[in-house]
Image (cartoon, rainbow, N blue to C red):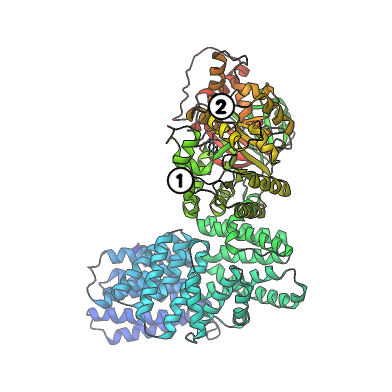
Amino acid sequence: MSRRGHELFEDELDDFEPRYKEVKNWVEELFERKSDADKVDQDIEIQLTKKQTLILSTLVPDEVLLMDKDERVAKMTALRAMHIVQTEECSVVNICDTYCNALQVVLDRGAPEATAEIEQMAAHSLKKLPNPIQADELFAIGKLFMTSFRARMARGELAPTVRAGFRALTVSRFLLAEDVSLELIPDLFYILLTRRRIAEAVDILQFALRTGQDHMSYESETWYHALCIDLILDAGFQLVSPQDISRFAEYSISRGKSAGPSRRRLVVGLWTYWLRVDSERRAKRFESESLSWAAHQDDGSMTTLLSAMRLAEGMLESLARKMDDLRKVVDLMELRSIADRELARLENDARVLRALHPRWCLLRANSCMLSGRLPAANVFFNQALEGAKKMNNRLEEAIARATNSNSVMWIQNARKGHFLHWREGEEYALASVRVVTMTDKNIVFVGIIASSSSLDQLVISSGYIAVQDGKITKTGSSKEFDTLEKAGEFSNYKVIKLSRDQFIIPGFVDCHTHAPQFPNIGLGLDRPLLEWLAKYTFPLEKKYSDTDFAAKVYDQVVQRLLKNGTTTACYFGSLHVDGTLELVKSAVKHRQRALIGKVSMNKENDAGYYNDTKKELEEVETFIKKVLAYQNELVEPVVTPRFAVSCDKELMDGLASIAKKYNCRIQSHISENLSEIEYVLETNPKCTTYGDVYDESGILNEKCIMAHAVHLTDKELSLLPKKGVSVAHCPASNTRLKSGLCPVRRIINANITVGLGTDVSGGDNASILDAIRRTMDVSMCLEMQGSPDCALNWKEAFYLATLGGAKALNLHHKIGNFEVGKDFDALLIDVYSMGGQIDKYEGALPTTTDEYAVELLQKFIFVGDDRNIAQVYVKGEKVKDIL
Ligand SMILES: Nc1nc2[nH]cnc2c(=O)[nH]1
C-alpha cells in the first residue's frame, strides 16, 4: 500500500503547477535550514507539510482563483506527508496527524471514495507502531478514528462508520475529552438508529445525558437536552416516551437557559414534536420562531442539516394539516415557499452526505405530494427507497415507506377534517406502499395449476395464470400460453415456469382461529370446553392488556400462518382494543388478508375477564373505526361476541346493531359442546335452540360465521341456511377438547356454506393442511361408526380449505380460486423440496402427465407440510419465499 501511495505521489509530482513549486520551495527552504538530518528534521518537515496541507485545503474560491490547482496542491502536500511517514521513522502523533490531514483534504474535495485507500494506508502504518503510551499519542489516534468516522460516513458505509465512531468515543472518554464525545454522539446515534442498533443508540444517549450532567454551564445543559429531543425525534417510532424530554426542553426555553443553536434545536424540535402528537395549540407557540430559523445561515454540519430537515418535515406536516382551511391559505403559501427554499438548500448537502440522500428525496416526495404533483412525488419516493436499499439501510427504507404512506394518510384525513397521531402513520405504511414496492407487477405462472370451482369440481391441469397488479387477468392452457408468448403478449411480464414437481394452488383460508391463544398451543388439552376456557384460556387472554406482549405474540402468529400457506385468516383477538390492534398491525405489516375481531364478553367469570356492557359497545365501535381508518383492503374488522355463555342479550343486541351500522361480519361459536348448549338453554329459557338465542338478537345473517356447529339440531340446520349463516369446521379442537365429531357432510347437505378453521389453541395445529387431513379423518370416523353420510374425500376437503372458506367468509368474489378478476392469493408448492417429508422414488409405476399432476397434489395434501410451501402470494405479492 505504501508503494502505491508513493508511486501516486511521484506521478503527480511530475506535472505539478508553478504555484505548488512556490510552496514546495518554501518548504524546502525551511527544511534546509534544519539540515542536520537528525530525527527532528523529519518531524519538522511533516509539521510544515501538514500545515501547508491544511492551509491549502481550506482555501475558498473567493480567496484563490485557481481553486482546482490549489486543491491539487493540497492533495500533493498530503501525499508528500504520507510518503514521508511511510518511508521514514516518525512519531505516533505525526503519523496520525498526517493521515487525518490527508483524509480531510480528500473529504473537502468532495471525493469521499478516495478516503478508503488512505484509511488502509493508515491502518497499515498504525499496525507497525508500539502501543501509545502518552496522552498526546492517544489523542492523535482518537482524532484519526474521528476522521475515519467522518470519511466512512461520507462513503455511506454505515457499519464501518459505527466501528470508527465507537473507537473514537472510547478514546475520548478515556481522555475525558467531552467535547469530542459530544461532537461525535449525535451522528453516531443517528447511524446506530439507521442500523436498528437501538440498544446501543440508547446507551449512547444515556451517556450523553450523563456527560451533560457533569457540565456546569446552562448552555451545554440545554444543549444536551436539545440533542436528546432531536435524537428522539429521529428515533421516531422506536423510542417509547419522548414526552419527558420535550417537557424538559420547554422548561429550558421558558427559563431562558438556552441560546443560539441550542435554542434553535429546541424550538424546532418542540414544534415538530407537538405537531406530531397532534397538539396544534402547543405547536403554535413554537411555530413562528421555528419558521424564522429558516432564513438563518447554517454551518453545514451534519447536526444542523438534520435540524433543517426536521424543520422542513415539520413544515410539510404543518402544510398537510392546513390543506383544507381556506382562511389559512396565506399561511400555506408562505410556508410552502419557505419549505421549497429549505428543500433546495438541503439538496446539495444531502448529495454530499450520501447517508442522508434518501431522507432528502423523501422530503421532496412529500412536498410534491402536498402540492398535488403525484408523478414527481413517486419519482422522489422511489429514489428514497432505492437510496436506502443501496445503503442496505433498513430503517431508512422503513421510514421511506412509512413517510410516504403517512403523507398520503395525512392529506386524505386532513381533507376530511381528521388529523392523525403521527405514530399511526407507521401502521398504515406498508399497505399503501405495497403498490410502489411490488417488484413484479406483471407475472405469469406457467405449469400445473389446481383449483376448485365447486365441492365436486377440482381442476388440475397444465396451464398459465397471468397476474397484473395483484389481480388475475388471464388464464388458459399451456398451449394457449405458447401461442400468446410467441405473439409477444407476455413481453412485459416476468414469466415463472414451474418445474415438473411444482404446482400452484389457491392460498388457504383459515375461517376460525384465536390469535391470543397461540402461546398455549399444544397445552392444557385435558379439560372439556367450559373448564378449559376458565382454567387456561381466559387467564392467558387477559395478559393481552399488555400491548407489548400482544405485539410480540401477534407478529409471530401472523408469520406462522403465512409460513403455513394461510393467506386469509379470520381471527378472534382478545377483549382489549389496543392489544387487538396489534394483531391488525401485524397483518398489515406482513400483508396477510385478515378479518379481525375484538372479542366481546360482559358476563362475569372467575378470571375477571369481561367488560361492562356500555364500555364494551363503545370499545367495539372504537376498534372498528380504527381498523377502517387503515383503509387497507386486506384487513377488515369483525364484530365478535365470544358466545352466548359470555354475552347477555343486551350486549348481543348492541353488537348486532353495530355490525349493521358498519356493514361488518359477525363471528361467534355455536353448539360446540353439550354442557355449553345446556347452559345456554338454561340461561335463555324462552329459546328452544342455541341458534334461537343468536337469532333473537339479530346476530344471524349472511355476513355471520359460526365456529364448530358440532351438535346442531334439525331446527338449526334449517335456520342457519335460511339466514345465510356459514360454519367454520374446526376438527382439531373438536377432537382435542372432546366436543364431538362434527357431521360436516350433513351440514353441507343442509345447504350451509362450510370452511375450515384451525381454532388454536383448542386446536393443536396452526396449519390448514392439518385441518384438511383432520376433516377427512373425522368424517371417515363418522362413516365407520355407521353414519349414513359418506366421508369427505381429499378433493372435497381441499375445496373447504380454499373456495369453501372464501365463500364462508363472503370473500369468494375476491379469492378462493383462479377466476379472472380475483386477487392472486396463491401457494407455489414444491413437492420434493429439500428436507421435506416427501421422498421421490425413481422408477415407480409409470403415469401420464395428467396422472402425475394429480399424484403430486395428493402427496402434498396427505404428506406435505410448510417445507413444501415454497412461495406464498397475497394479492400478487410474495410474502414467503423459500425456493
Ligand atoms: N374452541 C373454543 N371455543 C370457544 N367458545 C368460546 N370461546 C371459545 C374459545 O376460545 N375456543
**Badge 2: how crowded within 10 Å, few (<14), some, or many (20+)?**
many
Q: Which mark is residue 191?
A: none
Q: Is 695 placed left or right of 853 in the picture? A: right
**Badge 1: how crowded within 10 Å, few (<14), some, or many (20+)?**
some
Q: Is residue 202 above or below residue 771?
A: below
Q: Disc 1 designates what residue?
A: 539
Residue 488: horizontal and vertical position, in percent? 73, 36
Q: Nearer the viewer, residue 89 or 662?
A: 662
Question: Tag 2's secondary structure?
Answer: helix
- Dividing the image into four equal quarters, which quarter contains ligand 1? top right
Q: Magenta region: which residues? A: 602-606
Q: Are marks 2 and 1 in contact (CB under 8 Å)?
A: no
Q: Is 314 placed left or right of 237 in the picture? A: right
Residue 859: horizontal and vertical position, in percent? 53, 22
Question: Tag 1's secondary structure?
Answer: helix
Q: How many marks?
A: 2
Looking at marks 2 and 1 on the same chain, the residue that comes earlier in the sequence is marked by: 1
Residue 347: horizontal and vertical position, in percent? 60, 70
Q: Main secondary structure of the magenta part?
A: loop
* Residue drawn at the location 53% of the way across and 21% of the way down: 777
Task: Name the front one of labels 2 and 1.
Answer: 1
Q: CA distance from mark 2 to mark 1?
A: 30 Å
* Residue drawn at the location 63% of the way across and 73% of the way down: 280
Q: Is residue 300 above or below residue 752?
A: below
* Residue drawn at the location 45% of the way across and 45% of the way down: 539
- Under mark 2, the amino acid is Ile
Q: Which mark is residue 772?
A: 2
Q: Is residue 2 above or below residue 259?
A: above
Residue 507 visible from this viewpoint: no
- Under mark 1, the amino acid is Pro
Residue 214: horizontal and vertical position, in percent? 34, 80
